Structure formats: structure tokens, C-alpha cells
Image (cartoon, rainbow, N blue to C red):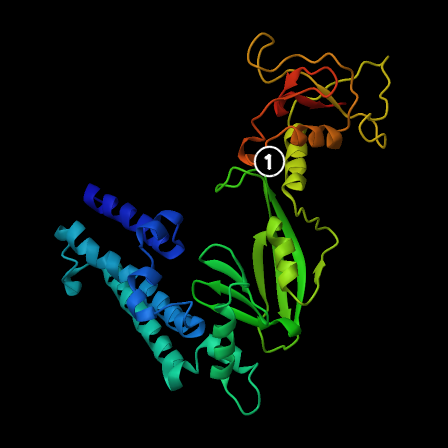
Amino acid sequence: MDSPEVTFTLAYLVFAVCFVFTPTEFHSAGLTVQNLLSGWLGSEDAAFVPYHLRRTAATLLCHSLLPLGYYVGMCFAASEKQLYYPSQTPETWRAFLLLALMLPAIACTLIYYWSRDRWACHPLARTLALYALPRSGWRAVASSVNTEFRRIDKFATGVPGARVIVTDTWVMKVTTYRVHVAQQQDVHLTVTESQQHDLSPDSNLPVQLLTIRVASANPAVQAFNIRLNSTEYGELCEKLRAPIRSAANVVIHQSLGDLFLETFASLVEVNPAYSVPSSQDLEACIGCMQTRASVKLVKTCQAAAEGECQQCYCRPMWCLTCMGKWFASRQDPQRPDTWLASRVPCPTCRARFCILDVCAVR
């Protein structure tokens, strides 16, 4: 391939991936289906269900046109291949063109099926129909959802491609191509997994992400998973009527302090270990008096005469948890993004140290 072809292919690939998964920069620039077609889609706040009926259809169609857009672009980027004359193009390009034409054709056929009987065949409409009373239809349920979504006391979180919305009656998950809906009184919620990340890309803070399985008592309603930050777990529980069960191996850290202690412990584990002399016995931690001392402050971040940290000559006197709590207690609660990089005085001799200087006792 010539240089223009490679350049266009890489540029279009980046554009296509960003257009489908829409990072923050694309949202800020307005390069999303919701923004480009806002005049036709209407307002989500004014009519939640009709908005997402149209949005999912428009998103499916726009994304199906991406391969065709690449072929048209290659007609100009590789004009010597004469791709604008399909009969004269190589067989590989003809097959790609056929696929690029089939995808929007299939998408249009599916959207036409969804839109029949005023969108009654759409997956969202069919799910709402399962909750309709005998003499009413899915539109009555949609009206209830629209009303509750407009209320300011709803719980809403998540990125645009996986939003979680909880109202007084409904639990909803909004994805790129679908909207999952379940009625609160019929659902069983279970925390199935937790993922601990030392740093969040958005805030440079430790974060724990919870995966919650939402399963309806109605077997016709498809179960789905929602993901949220553990610090939002308490707010979610307040909005839900049903209790949330947790798997036996899942520990939920609902406060920033809990998350910091988890991150503090994981960082100390990778620091060099401190070997206790055979003549020295480890005593109980003077902070909690419940466990033996398990950490020693040894300057390992820099050379002895460099930096702000100082050498601590105290014997091991603290357990890992109490040292982590001491470290957190000396931080500015308004600046949690600085906690991991800060320095605090030793609780005994006041020599300054950082997390890199906390060594586990071996």
C-alpha cells in the first residue's frame, strides 16, 4: 500500500473507533450521534423512551455506514486503483464493497421492523409491554418511565455508553444499541464482582468498580449487569427498594479512606522487604494492640542525603493497617489526588517518609 492509503486507513480506523466508543474528546467536540442528530432525536428529558427508540435506531444505522464511508474515502486516497468502478476493482475490494452495502441494508431492514406499529416491535417497547396492565399497552408504561426520569431525585451514573439510571420504580441501563429496563419490585440484585484500580484515569485516585447483576423475577425480561464506583454504592442502595446481595468473595469499600488503605497495602507489597534481626522480637502494634507490628520505615525512595524524606531509626512498631490510617489522617481531605505522592512524619520520631519508604517486615 502507498503512503496515502496507509495514512487514510489509520486515520479512518481511529475515527471509526472513537465514533463508536465516543471518548470524552469526541463528546466535547460534539462528534456523537446524539449531537449530530439532536434535531430529529428530540430531548431525552422531555421524552426518555421516544428519544431512545430513535437514538438506538439512528446509532445502528450510522455505525453500519462506517465501512461504506471507508470505501468511498479510499476511492480518493487510492485513485489509481479505480475503486469507483467496481467492475474493474480487485476481487477483495468488490467483496468489501458488497459487505459495506449489506450492513446498512440489514440495518435499514431491522429499523423498519422496529418502527412498525409506531415502534411497537422495538426491543425497548417489547420489554415495557411485559409490565403493561391487561387493558393498557407499552405506551402507558413508557409514559410512567418518562415521568419518573424527569424527576430530579433519580440516581444516574456511568459513562454515556453504559449509563445506569434508577428511578422510584425502574432500574435501567442505557447502552449504545439498547436500553435495559427492569421494575424494582421484581428484581434480584447481586454484587458479583469487584475490581480494584490503584489510579482512576479521570481523577488520579484509587477506585473500586462493582458489577451488579440485575435479574427480574419475570423470565421474559433479560437480566443485565450494571457497573458503578463503590463510592456511589450507598446512594444506589438508598434509591433501591430491593436489598442487594453480595457474593462471598466481594468486599465493598464505600469510602475514600477504605479505597486508600487498599491501595496503600498493594503499593507497600511491591516495596523492598525489611529483614528483622534474629535477636529482635516483634511486639504488638502500638496503634491497635491487636496484631503484631508488620512494617518498618526505611528510606528507599532516594539516596540517604537526597530528597525530603528522612531515615527513620525506630524499630517496627506499627501494623500495615494502622500505618496506612496514620498516613491518610495526615492528608488534606479536599485534595485526595495528592495523597499517594505526599510525605508525612513518622508517628513516633517525626522523620518524614513517603509510601515508597514503608517496607513490610519479613
Up the image or down, 21 lies above or below 255; here it is: below
Q: Quick check: can you spot residue 209?
A: no
The local crowd at label 1, few if under 14, some if 14 to 19, many if 20 or more residues have their Cα within 10 Å, is few
The quarter in which the C terminus is drawn is top right
Q: Position of residue 32 (x, y in %)?
A: 34, 58
Who is closer to the viewer here, 263 or 43?
43
* Image-based side of 38 in relation to 170, left or right: left
- Residue at 52%, 37% (x, y): give it: 204
The quarter in which the N terminus is drawn is top left
> Toward which corner of the image does residue 70 lie, by quadrant?
bottom left
Who is closer to the viewer here, 58 or 107?
58
> Toward which corner of the image does residue 3 lie, by quadrant?
top left
Q: Position of residue 172 (x, y in %)?
A: 54, 67
> Toward which corner of the image does residue 191 lie, by quadrant?
bottom right
- Residue at 36%, 76% (x, y): give it: 111
- Residue at 68%, 23% (x, y): give it: 358
How many numbered discs, if any?
1
Q: Position of residue 87 (x, y in %)?
A: 16, 65
* Image-based side of 314 in relation to 60, left or right: right
Residue linked to disc 1 = 333
Q: Position of residue 253 (x, y in %)?
A: 67, 46
Up the image or down, 276 lies above or below 177; here it is: above
Q: Residue farthest to the top?
A: 305
Q: Quick check: can you spot residue 259?
A: yes
- Residue at 64%, 19% (x, y): give it: 353
Q: Residue farthest to the bottom?
A: 135
The local secondary structure at tag 1 comes to loop
Looking at the rendered structure, the kind of residue marked 1 is: Pro
